[in-house]
Image (spheres, rainbow, N blue to C red):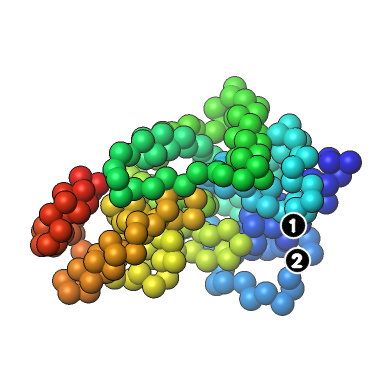
């Protein structure tokens, strides 16, 4: 029964969970009926311009779970999830191979242990509080372990702590729901993000939109410190409103942009009148 539920999960354009399938509509021509024929697909992206296509295993697994009807979520097993994720990986590898003979599929998993171990009275790590949240996290983590074990001999999935380090600096596209992954853009020649569901492709100068309510934060450069300050949807809650307003005011007064350097940020933060907050923020840079 539950296997049937997974087989009948919401998909779009490809035999992939809807969030993943909608993203790939920007890259590949549909192979099955679209879930929303009226949806305007963003401008097509030429996958051959990228050397590598990095996909976060957590995002792939989460997208699959989100495609299952809510009434079945508490009963879906990690084993069934893992088998379905492995099938999706095979589909994506086949799609990529048929469109590009140069773009390499790179699957990865992160623990984020270093990122989440930060100690500061201002930083708030998001936690799973409800039974549903705890179950969801548990089944995703267990399914991911099983998928990693499936591909252990082929060494298909690379494991990282908090920073993604490719073997060489290449031009890459990344599918991830985790803003922290995008901090690794400095390790690539270039790194673009393709979003689940929207299929929008964003360069590093648009990564600020992944802050919590980030579309209004174009004056805030993309940096680790501001993930802690403004938060995101999965790892960190935003700092209190006064801190955020102080930073936005500082950014506005000093004309910050997505090109503002780390040295200028440090110099401007030193101007804060709240010395304790200033020192905390500098320690998070």
12 or 125, nearer to the observer = 125
- Residue at horizontal 69%, vertical 47%? 65
Residue 261 percent coordinates (x, y): 18, 59
Q: Secondary structure at mark 1?
A: strand
Q: Residue at x 29, y 68 (%)?
A: 245
Q: Distance of mark 2 from mark 1, alpha carbons? A: 7 Å
Q: Earlier in the sequence, mark 2 or mark 1?
A: 1
Q: Nearer the viewer, residue 140 or 194?
A: 140
The circle drawn on residue 35 is 2
Residue 270 position in % (x across, y down) = 11, 57
Q: Is residue 80 above or below residue 178?
A: above
Q: Residues within 10 Å of mark 1 (few under 14, many from 20)?
A: many
Res 269 seen here:
yes
Location of residue 25 with respect to 8 vertically, above or below: below
Residue under the point 66% across and 45% down:
132
Q: Which residue is mark 1?
A: 11
Task: Determine whether the residue tagged by mark 2 lies in a helix, strand or loop.
Answer: loop
How far across and how far down the image is residue 216, in percent? Answer: 39, 73
Q: Are marks 2 and 1 in contact (CB under 8 Å)?
A: yes
Q: Could you tell me which quadrant the N terminus lies in?
A: top right
In-image side of 79 versus 131 (left or right): right
> Where residue 278 sits in the image (x, y, percent)?
16, 54
């Amino acid at each position: 029964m539950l296997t049937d539920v997974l087989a009948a999960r919401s998909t779009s354009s490809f035999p992939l969970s809807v969030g993943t399938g909608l993203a790939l509509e920007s890259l590949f021509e549909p192979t099955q009926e679209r879930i929303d024929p009226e949806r305007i697909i963003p401008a097509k992206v030429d996958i051959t311009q990228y050397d590598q296509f990095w996909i976060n295993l957590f995002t792939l697994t989460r997208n699959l779970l989100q495609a299952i009807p809510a009434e079945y979520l508490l009963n879906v097993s990690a084993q069934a999830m893992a088998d379905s994720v492995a099938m999706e990986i095979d589909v994506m590898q086949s799609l990529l191979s048929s469109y590009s003979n140069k773009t390499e599929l790179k699957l990865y998993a992160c623990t984020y242990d270093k990122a989440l171990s930060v100690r500061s009275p201002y930083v708030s790590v998001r936690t799973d509080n409800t039974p549903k949240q705890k179950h969801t996290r548990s089944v995703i983590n267990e399914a991911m372990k099983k998928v990693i074990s499936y591909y252990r001999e082929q060494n298909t999935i690379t494991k990282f702590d908090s920073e993604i380090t490719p073997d060489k600096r290449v031009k890459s596209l990344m599918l991830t729901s985790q803003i922290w992954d995008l901090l690794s853009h400095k390790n690539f020649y270039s790194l673009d993000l393709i979003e689940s569901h929207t299929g929008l492709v964003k360069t590093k100068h648009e990564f600020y939109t992944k802050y919590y309510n980030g579309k209004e934060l174009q004056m805030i450069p993309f940096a680790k410190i501001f993930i802690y300050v403004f938060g995101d949807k999965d790892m960190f809650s935003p700092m209190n409103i006064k801190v955020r307003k102080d930073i936005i005011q500082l950014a506005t007064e000093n004309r910050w942009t997505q090109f503002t350097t780390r040295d200028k940020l440090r110099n401007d933060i030193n101007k804060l009148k709240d010395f304790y907050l200033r020192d905390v923020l500098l320690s998070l840079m």
